[in-house]
Amino acid sequence: MVVQFSLNYQRQSMKKMIFFGVVFFSLLISYNSSAQTTISSADFKPLFGSWSGTLTYINYSDGTPFSMPVGLSIVQTEETNNFTFYFSFPDEPQANSEEIVSISGDGTLLNGEPVISKRLLEDGNLEVVTESMGRDANKPATIRHTYIIGGDVFVTREDVQFVGQEEWLNRNEFNFKKD
């Protein structure tokens, strides 16, 4: 009788432990999936103004890097989460362009791409990273954009990882210094 009671008690205790373990694990997963990295227009405030720098990109035909000078002017579109980037290429004025950069209302997307990381670097600059699925060289790939934002430095970098591959390839990088 005592042995039977002991076995029943152990089974009930084990069931409670399993139940609470499942509940705890479910809560942990729920918390991690709902905790998203967010950004705001305030993160981009140091970028307003004029910049000078270089664009370095990888030539698709032979894999060699090529660099050219580039100017950049960044303005906020009124009081919104939209910014206009005006690019000027002194050596190739036909490549001059403008791009609207936008932050979603909830701060989880930058230009429609999920923000996967936001961290303050040791040098005091902010690093923001986005990743999304896309195509590169006409193949499916994960595309990662890394932004380094500081008072006197701004870097944007695009890396790709082809589906089924482990290595990341740098496609282009803008390096700017404040004018």
Image: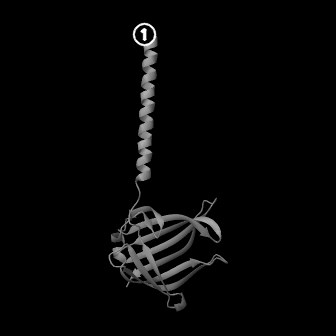
Percent across and percent down for residue 145 are: 49, 69
The answer to whether any part of residue 23 appears in the image is yes
The answer to whether any part of residue 91 appears in the image is no
Image vertical order of residue 101 relative to residue 19, above or below: below
- Quadrant holding the N terminus: top left
Which residue corresponds to mark 1? Answer: 2
Q: Residue furthest top?
A: 1
Percent across and percent down for residue 14 are: 45, 26
- Quadrant holding the C terminus: bottom left
Q: 173 or 45: which is nearer to us?
A: 45
Q: Is residue 96 found left or right of 140 in the rendered image? A: left
User: In percent of the image, x 43 and y 13: which residue is there?
Assistant: 5
Percent across and percent down for residue 116 are: 46, 61
Image vertical order of residue 17 relative to residue 120, above or below: above
Q: Amino acid at mark 1?
A: Val
Percent across and percent down for residue 166 are: 60, 59
Q: Quadrant of residue 107?
A: bottom left
Q: 16 or 147: which is nearer to us?
A: 16
Characterize the local packing of mark 1: few (<14), some (14-19) or many (20 or more) Cα atoms within 10 angstroms. Answer: few
Helix, strand or loop at mark 1: helix
